[in-house]
Amino acid sequence: MFTKSSIIIIIHSSSFLLLLILHTFLLKVSQGQNTLLLGESIKEGQSLVSSNRIYELGFFNSTNSTNSYVGIWYHQLPVKTIIWVANREKPVSDSSGVITIDTQGALVINDSKGTIFSSNTKGSNQTIAKLMNSGNFVLKASKYSQEFL
């Protein structure tokens, strides 16, 4: 049988293990994702963050409009400072915007009315989009490839 002190040690060990697992999970979540894979999407309210945590990519609204745009901004500044806009000429007019990689490996921005933007690239089912530490948003042939499309 267990003694009272061995039960206390087991409880403390279990609690420590649970805290360690929880900490690891929360750390992974807080680090953010910098890569978009085939089958994944980014919708309004979601974003990619560069691994150095300087840049963020996602949908944003301009101050004078309800239109949404896909852009890159500085991640940790208190005031969102946009440094690049993908669909300046064709904004999303509602909250239905989605960024995906289609089955041909092209990066696409869609809304409820159809396609707003599609890259002129043909990749494969291994194509990824990555927000680099430089702030560039690039399409790569695969997760491990150095080849940009």
Image: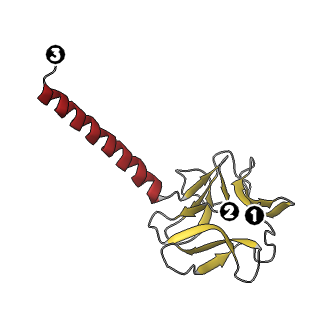
Sequence-wise, the earlier of marks 1 and 2 is 2
- Contact (Cβ within 8 Å) of mark 1 with mark 2: yes
Q: Residues within 10 Å of mark 3 (few under 14, many from 20)?
A: few
Point out residue 16 in the picture as x, y percentages from the top left corner: 26, 41
Left/right placement of residue 112 relative to residue 46 reads right
Q: Residues within 10 Å of mark 1 (few under 14, many from 20)?
A: some
Indicate the secondary structure of the residue bearing disc 3: loop
Sequence-wise, the earlier of marks 1 and 3 is 3
Query: Label 2, on which residue?
Result: 44
Q: Which mark is residue 95?
A: 1
Which image quadrant: the N terminus? Answer: top left
Residue at screen point 58% across, 70% down: 136
Looking at the rendered structure, the kind of residue marked 2 is Glu
Left/right placement of residue 114 relative to residue 48 reads right
Point out residue 61 in the picture as x, y percentages from the top left corner: 70, 74
Which image quadrant: the C terminus? Answer: bottom right
Q: Which mark is residue 1?
A: 3
Name above or below for residue 122 compared with residue 13.
below
Indicate the secondary structure of the residue bearing disc 2: loop
Residue at screen point 53% across, 66% down: 132
